[in-house]
Amino acid sequence: MANYYKSLTPTHIEFIGQQKMFFLASASQMEVNLSPKGLDALRVISPERLLFLDFPGSGNRTARDIRLGGRITLMCCAFEGNPLILRCFCKGRLVEPSDAEFAERLELFDENLRHRARRLVLLDVEAVETSCGWAVPQMEFKTERQLLTDWVDKKTLSGELQAYIDSHDQPVDLQEI
């Protein structure tokens, strides 16, 4: 059975802090984008605000959807311990490296991740929903994958990272696909 809240409770905040993985869903045009995330890239700023460290990589749909006024849903699932699904229904705002607040907010993340950031995403929580999660399997966390961080480091060393980011930062008209 689902329960609804106006903002995150202390129990929700503790739960989010324990998760090794979360999911972001965004929408603005014809389809919903859904992405799994890891690498300790999520921070709770307050019961009404979350901060996500966005890495360069496979695409840029979340940022594109935010720019188009799209909605964001963040979901965490308990894969260990007591079952729970927590969804935060949010409005997103991009914080780019050129923005005055970027450096201060970036300090909230581990030093070894900061130089790999494409941007930060502020999520203003408008509603929270929890549900049982009884069908979510129990799994043990083994380790973080290093593939993304290694790829970013390689692109940085070759001087290709900013060009990659810029090329993936252009809007896509989905009706032309």
Image (cartoon, rainbow, N blue to C red):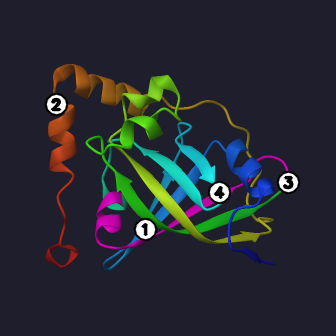
Please state the horizontal and vertical placement of residue 59, each as a whole percent of the image. Answer: 30, 52
Residue with the mark numbered 2: 160
Q: Which mark is residue 26?
A: 1
For badge 2, the amino acid type reads Glu
Counting other residues with Cα less than 10 Å from the Cα at mark 2, is it few (<14), some (14-19), or many (20 or more)? few
Q: Which residues are magenta?
A: 63-81
100 lies above or below 171? above
- Visible in this render: residue 25? yes
Q: Residue at x 49, y 48 (%)?
A: 52
Counting other residues with Cα less than 10 Å from the Cα at mark 3, is it few (<14), some (14-19), or many (20 or more)? few
Does residue 140 appear to the left or right of 118 in the view shown? right
Residue 64 among those drawn in magenta: yes
Residue with the mark numbered 3: 82
Mark before the other along the chain sequence, 3 or 4: 4
Q: Quadrant of residue 98?
A: top left
Residue with the mark numbered 4: 76
For badge 1, the amino acid type reads Ser
Does residue 135 appear to the left or right of 43 in the view shown? right
